[in-house]
Image (tube, rainbow, N blue to C red):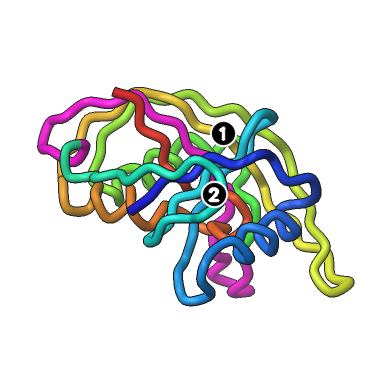
Amino acid sequence: MYLTKLMPIMGDDYLIHQEVKKLFEDTQKVLFQQTDSCLIVLSDLPCTKGKTVPVDFSSYALSEEQHLFSVRLNAASRSTKTGKRETVLPDKVEAWVASRLSKIGVEAVFQIKPEGIRKSLRKDKVISLSSIFVTGYMTVKEPDLFRKALESGIGHGKGFGYGLLNIFS
């Protein structure tokens, strides 16, 4: 796996996704997260643009290992009635995040910063995603699940800049 640091790309999440995909082979999936100062991309193969460094997640995914973390999530779940994704209600967001983190094999203490609805335009269709930014402290309980989450991201909306798990040791 490789992390690449690039200059920010202006535009909505879908436009950023399209521009990032142009920098990498079509066959590989990429995760990205944009801040005001840079765009970070996780990929299977190195990028020829920007600063790219190899990353080995095995040292981060040890049982009982503890990490500071952050992740941007699309706070949505599938409705059992309609089958469509719906925004998680504000009073249920904390439990929803705890459930997502449990599924990747960690226990965590965290804070949530609601970022509101992020809208993108794709072929004249508006795509709306409910964005939250989660920061906290986690303990790895199931290393294999956690390693997979580091490599694949978590949650929905990964193509729009969600799900890239940032670990700070």
Q: Position of residue 12 (x, y in %)?
A: 78, 51
Verify whether residue 88 appears in magenta: no
The kind of residue on which mark 2 rests is Phe
Task: Count residues near mark 1 (Cα–Cα under 10 Å), then give few for <14, some for 14-19, many for 20+.
Answer: some
User: Which residue is located at x 17 percent, y 45 percent?
Assistant: 58
Q: Residue furthest front?
A: 48
- The one nearer the camera, 4 or 139, is 4
Q: Which mark is residue 39?
A: none
Q: CA distance from mark 2 to mark 1?
A: 14 Å
User: Which residue is located at x 69 percent, y 59 percent?
Assistant: 19
The kind of residue on which mark 1 rests is Phe
Closer mark to the observer between disc 2 and disc 1: 2
Question: What range is drawn magenta here?
Answer: 60-84
Q: Position of residue 125 (x, y in %)?
A: 84, 70
Q: Position of residue 14 (x, y in %)?
A: 72, 60
- Residue named by callout 1: 133
- Residue named by callout 2: 32
| Image quadrant assignment for residue 139 | top left
| Image quadrant assignment for residue 79 | bottom right
Quadrant for the C terminus in the image: top left
First of labels 2, 1 by sequence position: 2
- The one nearer the camera, 85 or 36, is 36
Task: Count residues near mark 2 (Cα–Cα under 10 Å), then give few for <14, some for 14-19, many for 20+.
Answer: many
